[in-house]
Image: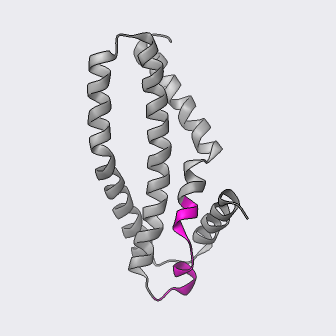
């Protein structure tokens, strides 16, 4: 079984689990907070990059591609950390402890539905902000 299928299976197992409401909310919040903290330096670098080179049309396309990749990596890290924090909050749940979060990271990193939707949204806002590509 490859990474994609294992990740899809592990993600489905995580979604089918009955977790406590506290674990679910706290795990998601901590994962979101940590993911944002990880990506704040990248966001600042991208903003500076846009201010310096944003006038060049080719650089704008590269910038859009970098943002798209960063959003997909953010999604993968968010799902990975969500499972990781949930595992640390519920140590007695054997089903949860058996989930391998690295496969979920790969699955969410390469998720075509999320990638396609995020690309459409990025292109829409880029078109609105830049006045047409």
Q: What percent of the width, then of the height, locates residue 72?
A: 50, 44
**Residue 30 in the image, given as x and y percentages of width and height:** 34, 63
**Residue 83 percent coordinates (x, y):** 48, 68
Residue shown at 46% from the left, 26% from the top? 64
The residue lying at 32 percent from left, 31 percent from top is 46
Residue at image position (44%, 73%) is 86
Above or below residue 24? Residue 61 is above
Q: Is residue 18 left or right of residue 24?
A: right
Residue 103: horizontal and vertical position, in percent?
A: 58, 63
In this rendering, would 89 be left or right of 65? left
Q: Quadrant of residue 99?
A: bottom right
Name the side, left or right, on which 119 lies relative to 54.
right
Residue 99 covered by magenta stretch: yes
Please, which residue is most extreme toward the bottom here? 92
Dominant secondary-structure state across the stretch colored magenta: helix
Q: Is residue 60 above or below residue 93?
A: above
Q: Total label count?
A: 0
Q: Which span of residues is magenta-colored?
A: 92-104
110 relative position to 86: left or right: right
Q: Is residue 106 above or below residue 49?
A: below
**Residue sitting at the far right:** 1
The quarter of the picture where the N terminus appears is bottom right
Q: Is residue 10 magenta?
A: no
The colour mode here is one colour
Above or below, 23 relative to 52? below
């Amino acid at each position: 079984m490859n990474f994609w299928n294992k990740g899809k299976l592990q993600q489905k197992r995580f979604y089918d689990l009955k977790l406590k409401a506290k674990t679910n909310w706290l795990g998601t919040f901590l994962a979101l907070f940590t993911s944002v903290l990880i990506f704040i330096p990248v966001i600042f670098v991208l903003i500076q990059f846009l201010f310096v080179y944003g006038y060049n049309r080719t650089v704008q396309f590269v910038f859009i591609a970098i943002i798209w990749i960063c959003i997909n990596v953010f999604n993968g890290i968010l799902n990975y950390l969500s499972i990781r924090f949930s595992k640390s909050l519920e140590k007695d749940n054997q089903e949860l402890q058996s989930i391998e979060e690295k496969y979920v990271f790969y699955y969410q990193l390469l998720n075509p539905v999320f990638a396609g939707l995020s690309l459409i949204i990025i292109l829409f806002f880029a078109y609105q902000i830049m006045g047409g590509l």
